[in-house]
Image (cartoon, helix red, strand yellow):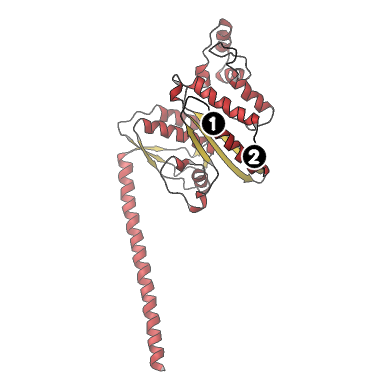
């Protein structure tokens, strides 16, 4: 009886030691992997152009600095063909800015730059980034709780509008808001006008037109919210207002860019093509906004 008890105690001690050894080996293996990753990461950063993303990475909340950051990327000319984006200090980010960031990264990739980087340390900013659809376009691991998200960033590069894509997004968004899957022709018209405006005016060669549509959903204290962002990397609206007659030239001379932009949305400036059926896109968007089909409309040039 005593012998059996002694063997039982000895077996338990041996088991505890075995568990401790396994934990120790696992810990050491983890430390080894972290050291290897640290060395690899340092080597990557050393070989790359390090670019720090603004802490407040939001066109809406930090317009001037964010747009400057984007414009600097557009005009980037570096001998090193690798870029490392450090996002570790980002504390505020939104889906629209992420969609714009994706579009710029795609541009840089076309120009043969290799892109890598890290994620925000801030939990909320990291969650928004992982759920946005950002990693549908770029390689990267996503936390399990953020893998299944209805948010997405769609990319299209074509010379015609894609009504099927936008119709699906609208149906899914309305179902999220109301519980019923329905179409909304006026919202559909808004997206078509945005795509047409990008294709017809944003690029000298419409075959190279590329636009990005971001869609996100959220349940907040004020209720359910759907957000959309439409981005194209063509010429800005101001640059494409090729004013032909003397009156329009004088008007544009005395108006600031923001006033000129408002005039374009109100339909006070005609299309550069001088065709009756053109120049309707921006006024249509303005009309839809005034009818409260959308709220919190934000446009930057």
Asked whether 171 or 253 is in front, the reply is 171
Secondary structure under the numbered disc 1 in the rendered image: strand
- The front one of 210 and 116 is 210
Tell how many labels: 2
Residue 60 in sight? no
> x, y percentage for residue 58?
52, 36
Q: Quadrant of residue 72?
A: top left
- Residue furthest out toward the right: 291
Lateral position of residue 28 relative to residue 238, left or right: left
Residue matched to label 2: 174
Quadrant assignment for the N terminus: bottom left
User: Mark 1 to mark 2: distance in Å?
Assistant: 18 Å
Residue at position x 43%, y 24% in the image: 208
- Furthest toward the top, the residue is 246
Q: Position of residue 186 (x, y in %)?
A: 65, 29
Label 1: which residue?
A: 230
In the picture, measured across the screen, residue 112 lies left or right of residue 120, that is: left
Disc assigned to residue 195:
none
* Secondary structure found at label 2: helix
Say left or right for 293 vs 203.
Answer: right
Disc 1 versus disc 2: nearer the observer: 2
Q: Residue at x 40, y 81 (%)?
A: 12
Would residue 102 appear left or right of 227 to someone viewing this image?
left
Counting residues from the start of the chain, the first of labels 1 and 2 encountered is: 2
For the point 55% across and 9% down, the residue is 249
Q: Nearer the viewer, residue 153 or 266?
A: 153
**Mark 2 residue crowding within 10 angstroms, few (<14) / some (14–19) / many (20+):** some
Residue at 36% over, 75% down: 17
- Location of residue 99 in the rendering, given as x and y in whole percent from the top left corner: 50, 35
Position in image of residue 153 (x %, y %): 50, 38
């Amino acid at each position: 009886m005593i012998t059996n008890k002694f063997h039982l105690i000895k077996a338990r001690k041996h088991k505890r030691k075995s568990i401790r050894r396994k934990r120790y080996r696992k810990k050491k293996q983890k430390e080894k992997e972290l050291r290897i990753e640290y060395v690899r990461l340092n080597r990557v950063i050393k070989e790359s152009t390090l670019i720090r993303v603004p802490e407040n990475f939001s066109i809406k909340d930090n317009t001037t600095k964010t747009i400057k950051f984007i414009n600097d990327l557009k005009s980037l000319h570096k001998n090193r063909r690798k870029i490392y984006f450090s996002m570790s200090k980002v504390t505020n980010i939104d889906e629209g800015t992420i969609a714009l960031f994706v579009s710029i990264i795609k541009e840089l990739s076309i120009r043969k730059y290799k892109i890598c980087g890290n994620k925000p340390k801030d939990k909320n900013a990291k969650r928004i980034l992982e759920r946005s659809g950002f990693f549908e376009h770029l390689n990267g691991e996503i936390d399990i709780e953020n893998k299944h998200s209805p948010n997405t960033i769609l990319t299209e590069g074509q010379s015609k509008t894609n009504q099927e894509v936008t119709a699906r997004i609208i149906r899914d968004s309305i179902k999220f808001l109301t519980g019923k899957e329905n179409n909304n022709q006026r919202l559909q018209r808004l997206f078509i006008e945005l795509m047409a405006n990008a294709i017809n005016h944003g690029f000298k060669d419409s075959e190279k037109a590329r636009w990005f549509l971001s869609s996100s959903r959220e349940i907040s204290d004020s209720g359910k919210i759907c957000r959309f962002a439409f981005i194209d990397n063509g010429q800005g609206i101001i640059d494409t207002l090729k004013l032909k007659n003397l009156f329009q030239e004088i008007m544009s001379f005395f108006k600031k860019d923001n006033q000129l932009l408002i005039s374009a949305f109100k339909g006070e400036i005609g299309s550069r093509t001088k065709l009756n059926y053109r120049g309707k896109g921006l006024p249509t968007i303005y009309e839809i906004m005034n009818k409260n089909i959308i709220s919190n409309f934000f446009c930057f040039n």
